[in-house]
Amino acid sequence: MSSESGAGTDADYTAAVVGGSGFTGGELLRLLYQHPEFDVVQATSRSKARKTVGHAHPNLREMDLRFTSPEELESVDVLFAATPHGVSMEHIDRFREAAGTVVDLSADFRLSSEAQYDEWYDGHVCPEYLEDAEYALPELNRDNLPGADLIASGGCNATATILGLKPLFDAGILDGDEQAVVDVKVGSSEGGAGGGDASSHPERSGIVRPYAPTGHRHEAEIEEFLGLSVSFTVHAVDMTRGASATCHLFPGAPVSNGDLWSAYRDAYAEEPFMRTVAGGGGVYRYPEPKAVAGTNYGEVGFEVDPGNRRLVVFSAIDNMMKGSAGQAVHAANIALGIEETAGLEFTGLHPVGAP
């Protein structure tokens, strides 16, 4: 069933969202509905088949679209898979038959080898596709995305960390042998719409709860794409949207504020969705999830601790946008040759409540 998308009849590409009733699926539908180049023709959901999109996502009540069964995929130009880990790898042949371009938002195709999935996940049922997939973090590998037909959108915690650290590798400040300690604070939406007891409001409200002190799976992404082994801890905190990474680094040689400003300017001055925020005036002196809530922007910042020969790097994203749906649409734009900022121009709100 077709929608009356923001693109209307002038849209160049048809799109489907598999797993459209979840939080990430809802964000994809919101972005695609307002996108000038996409016409959303299908959204699937096992639990809400035949119900309207607005039934699950009240902000999308204007969409003339009902959820259908994922067993009844329509032929489209682009299929976005917003499914839990393990689902896309089971159905990738069907997805690729249905669409010329598949953008997967799960972890199923982010890593490059079967051995990595054996170590970090529960194996992989179709490792032959791993070499076909292109990792989607545009600031990291934009040049590899044009024409890609299987795109693996990066994980939110890995995205926040990589965005903070990548400029230091580009500038030669880090080479991968340094000690790196990364602490990430994340909002409740990271657990998804079915987050369980730990994500219920009475249990989540007011907390700063370590839930992955060691061995978080996103370490594999960071190590693969930066070549850096990190000591990585994740805390669940009392916010709905957002991921905030604080990285403690101990480079072998002294580093000045000027070195860091040069590194971040060189890396991100031309990036449409990156902002450097490092110790300026006002209330928001460092990267803050609240300042990017609802947007595809990422913020990075830093501070030098010369007495301890330590760098502290901060980064903040909306885990549902820059860490998920927004990043997926950004990558699809590049893959298809669309203006890369299309559909992603929203700059956020201030003041705003809990993100």
Image: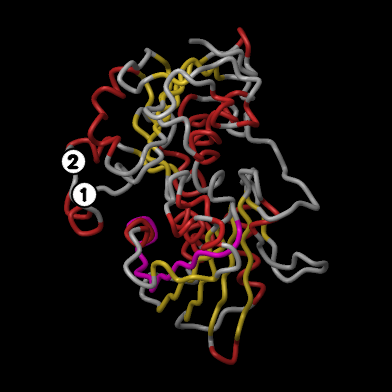
Q: Residues within 10 Å of mark 1 (few under 14, many from 20)?
A: some
Q: CA distance from mark 1 to mark 2?
A: 7 Å
**Residue that mark 2 sits on:** 127
Picture quadrant of residue 201: bottom right
Residue 307, image x, y percentages: 59, 92
Residue 131, image x, y percentages: 24, 40
Residue 245, image x, y percentages: 53, 65
Picture quadrant of residue 72: top left
**Residue that mark 1 sits on:** 113
Q: Residue at x 48, y 68 (%)?
A: 235
The answer to whether the residue labelled 1 contacts the one labelled 2, judged by CB atoms less than 8 Å apart, is yes
Examine the rendered structure and indicate whether residue 253 appears above or below residue 207: below
Q: Residue at x 52, y 50 (%)?
A: 189
Examine the rendered structure and indicate whether residue 40 appears above or below residue 159: above
Q: Which residues are magenta?
A: 223-239
Q: Identify the mark nearer the N-term, 1 or 2.
A: 1
Asked which secondary structure carries label 1, the reply is loop
Asked which secondary structure carries label 2, the reply is helix
- Asked if the stretch drawn in magenta spans residue 227, the answer is yes
